C-alpha cells in the first residue's frame, strides 16, 4: 500500500491526473521520528534512482524539489 501512496502523491505533485487519497502526510509520519538527515538521505536516494533510470536532470531536480516541499509534514525529530 505504501508504494501506491508514494507513486500517487508524486504523480499528483507533478500534475498527473490521479489524486492522492491516502492518510494525511503529517499524521502518517508524525510518530516515526524522521530527522532532517534521514529526509535528506531519502531525497538523495530518490535523486540517484531517477538519474540511474535516465530521467533528465531538469526533471530529476524538479521531482526532488517537490519532495523537499514535503519536509515540514514528514520531519518530526
Image (cartoon, rainbow, N blue to C red):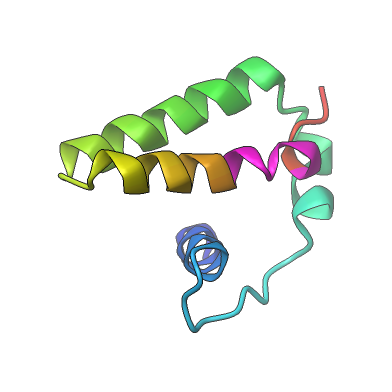
In magenta stretch: residue 3: no
Magenta segment boundaries in residue numbering: 67-73
In magenta stretch: residue 70: yes
Q: Is residue 20 above or below residue 13?
A: below
Foreground pick, 43 / 66? 66
Residue 4, position as x, y percentages in the image: 47, 67
SS majority, magenta: helix
Identify the residue shown where x is 78% and y is 44%: 73
Q: Is residue 28 above or below residue 13?
A: above
Left or right: residue 63 versus residue 76 is left
Residue 22, position as x, y percentages in the image: 68, 70
Residue 14, position as x, y percentages in the image: 49, 64
Q: Is residue 31 above or below residue 6?
A: above
Left or right: residue 1 versus residue 61 is right
Identify the residue shown where x is 49% and y is 30%: 42
Identify the residue shown where x is 76% and y is 31%: 75
Amino acid at each position: 500500500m505504501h508504494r501506491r501512496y508514494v507513486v500517487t502523491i508524486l504523480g499528483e505533485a507533478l500534475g498527473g491526473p490521479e489524486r492522492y487519497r491516502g492518510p494525511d502526510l503529517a499524521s502518517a509520519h508524525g510518530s516515526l521520528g524522521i530527522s532532517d538527515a534521514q529526509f535528506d538521505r531519502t531525497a538523495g536516494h530518490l535523486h540517484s534512482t531517477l538519474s540511474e533510470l535516465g530521467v533528465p536532470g531538469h526533471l530529476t531536480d524538479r521531482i526532488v524539489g517537490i519532495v523537499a516541499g514535503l519536509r515540514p509534514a514528514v520531519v518530526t525529530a
